[in-house]
Image (cartoon, rainbow, N blue to C red):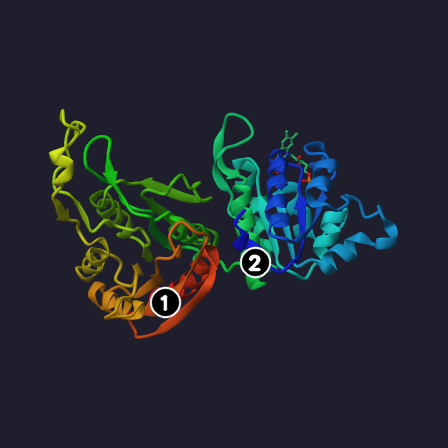
Amino acid sequence: MNSSRRSAARNVVVGVGGGIAAYKACALVRHFTEAGHNVHVVPTESALRFVGAATFEALSGNPVHTSVFESIPDVLHVKLGQQADLVIIAPATADLMARAAQGRSDDLLTGTLLTARCPVLFAPAMHTEMWEHAATRANVATLRARGATVLEPARGRLTGKDTGAGRLPEPDEIGTFGDLLLSRADALPRDLEGRTVVVSAGGTREALDPVRYLTNRSSGKQGYALARVAAQRGATVTLIAGNTMGLADPAAVDVVRIGSARELQAAMSEHARTADLVVMAAAVADYRPGEVAATKLKKDADGHSAALETVTMIENPDVLAGLVAARARGELAARSVIVGFAAETGDADCTVLDYGRAKLKRKGCDLLVLNAVGDGRAFEVDENAGWLLGADGSEAALSLDSKTVMASRILDAAVAQIGAPR
Ligand SMILES: Cc1cc2nc3c(=O)[nH]c(=O)nc-3n(C[C@H](O)[C@H](O)[C@H](O)COP(=O)(O)O)c2cc1C
């Protein structure tokens, strides 16, 4: 695991409902134990029909109980709830959320939910019909209104052969939101509900021939984190994904795959048209090979390739500046917010901040996330730091933290600007 995730040990209760995805709770337990946290698993009776207590005890290193009538001298439902820094429930079944919304205390997990005063995160998983049923919608609304974070489920393969909304997000994704709640100690806001967000992520790939391409070191992790957090803050999110080295699709996000900068430009101008927020986190190649060979460029008899030794590069379109110009021409929503990214290194003439300020001015976007790169910073890693520069002259330092925390801070700043007159 990434050692940078190790943080001060906290008490995490992982509640497990009786759904087919209960086995994925095992990986979630691992996520928290490997970060150094003290994890208590509280499965429901139904959950134990899917995964045995022995597995949860071995993974968490703590005894597993299900009923309030076990280990009575400890009064477990009070102790676990009062000591918890985070209660995270995965999978949250329709039945379990109904019981929680009613405030029932008919097992150890629901009792613990009533005594806990820490952030509570539900990761629902069920068939699409159950998720969309008015009763479940009402229960989710009740839990959210009371301050719990209820994640949007992923879309995809369900228990049988059917697919749809209701799939449990991947354990690492749920764990990431748990980490976020541990760091902010309040619920994830639903302040992007009814908003449309377009995020680009990853590096573009510029073809030389059918086999080779030029790309850059962007992993897409920051853009994916932005899309993931925006979706869980209630937005309808489209993620325009370039080369991302196999990152898993975020839950509840539409992913559009692109290759070259020009494909990115076409996808962005199509999807940004109706967006309230456009985030250009993709690392766009400034140049591309002037010619793309139709067949593989081969070495000649003496082992050289003149074509590969003399590739002529031509300039790619400036996608970010193009979006700002399109907005000025009225092709985007006038009150949309455009966020750009800059990865800079300082030199003898200018600091990273100088380059960032100049880029913000040149591009004309509303916010610029500026990352100092080099020495293993920003690219491919799970953490990020930098500055958030505003067209209004504001400058905020972004201290080193996970890309999910960074995404939250960037979205906080962007949300504050959505709808502002330009
Ligand atoms: C094979 C199987 C898979 C199930 N999967 C789910 C599921 O993914 N989500 C859900 O809400 N209920 C699911 N159920 C139904 C629940 O097990 C049932 O509603 C149970 O009462 C939930 O208990 P709980 O409140 O302890 O979670 C499933 C049942 C079976 C038999």
Residue 78: horizontal and vertical position, in percent? 78, 57
Residue 280: horizontal and vertical position, in percent? 30, 54
Which of the four quarters of the rendered structure image does ligand 1 lie in?
top right
Residue 16: horizontal and vertical position, in percent? 67, 42
Q: Nearer the viewer, residue 232 or 41?
A: 41
Disc 1 marks which residue? 388
Please identify the quadrant where the C terminus is shown: bottom left
Q: Is residue 22 above or below residue 140?
A: above
Q: CA distance from mark 1 to mark 2?
A: 22 Å
Is residue 323 left or right of 164 when viewed as pictured?
left
Outermost residue, front side: 302
Is residue 368 left or right of 316 when viewed as pictured?
right
Q: Secondary structure at mark 1?
A: strand
Residue type at the position of mark 2: Leu
Give the image quarter of residue 368: bottom left
Residue 278: horizontal and vertical position, in percent? 31, 56
Give the image quarter of residue 60: top right
Tell me if mark 2 has few (under 14), some (14-19) or many (20+) residues whose alpha carbon lies within 10 angstroms of its own: many
Residue type at the position of mark 1: Leu
Disc 2 marks which residue? 181
Circle number at residue 90: none
Q: Is mark 2 within 8 Å of ligand 1?
A: no
Q: Earlier in the sequence, mark 1 or mark 2?
A: 2
Task: Please name the residue shown 24% across and 34% down the image.
Answer: 212
Task: Please name the residue shown 61% across and 49% down the image.
Answer: 32
Give the image quarter of residue 133: top right
